[in-house]
Amino acid sequence: MTEAILEATNTCEHCHAYHDAGRKYCSQCSFPIDGTEDEKRSFRLTVSSRKRFLDDARDKIKSARIVIQVLAGLFFMIGLFMGFAMDDFASMIANLCLCVIYLMLAAWCSQNALGAILTAFIIYITLMVVNVIIDPATLFQGVIIKFFVIAGLVKGIRSAQEAKGFLKELQNLKAVPVDYE
């Protein structure tokens, strides 16, 4: 029985790691083992807030994924229009290839959100620049759509960076959400 009591006092409440007697903080997760109730509550609040921030960032990443999927749909529709209505099959193939690329980026977003969204942003900006070089009048065509696409992708990039930081903090605190393990 005394072994069970000793074992319980030598185990962190948060991550269940063993520690030497007399330590104030856990060496694995920084939980205040011998801290006051306020310090323990503060630690738990920090973990809880980081999880909420991570969830918020994940929601914004989902929005960026939707923007990428919408881009894929737009390139698909434009490709079909160019091919069948205007008999420009080269443009149709190019637009359908872009559609496939954006669909692959949307799928990759669940594995590496920052890389996928950043790649989608770079491709989109590159296409806009090439179009402006070829025909300067395209700069102002669809400017509202361009604004929303760029804003959505930039927001997604920032959220993916934030999510990466929050996830790293939670890993250091040994409090990674189950769906991230």
Image (spheres, rainbow, N blue to C red):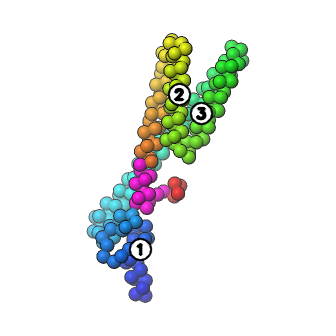
Residue under label 3: 102
Q: Nearer the viewer, residue 2 or 122?
A: 122
Q: x, y (%) of residue 162? A: 41, 45
Which mark, by number, is residue 18? 1
Crowd around label 2: few <14 · some 14–19 · many ≥20 (10 Å): many
Q: Is residue 39 left or right of residue 29?
A: left
Residue 63, given in percent of the width and then of the height, sits at 50, 38
**Label 1: how many residues lie within 10 Å, few (<14), some (14-19) or many (20+)?**
some
Which stretch is magenta? 165-177
- Label total for image: 3
Residue 139 x %, y %: 49, 16
Q: Which residue is painted at 41% across and 80% down in the image?
A: 7
Please report whichever mark, 2 or 1, sits nearer to the chain's N-terminal start.
1
Q: Secondary structure at mark 3?
A: helix
Which disc number belongs to residue 108? Answer: none
Magenta stretch secondary structure, dominant: helix
Verify CB contact (< 8 Å) between mark 3 and mark 1: no
- Position above or below: 68 against 89: below
In the rendered image, residue 166 lying in the magenta stretch gets the answer yes
**Residue drawn at 38 percent across, 74 percent down:** 19
Quarter of the figure with residue 6:
bottom left
Tell me the distance, in whole angstroms, between the alpha carbons under discs 2 and 3: 10 Å
Q: Amino acid at mark 3?
A: Tyr
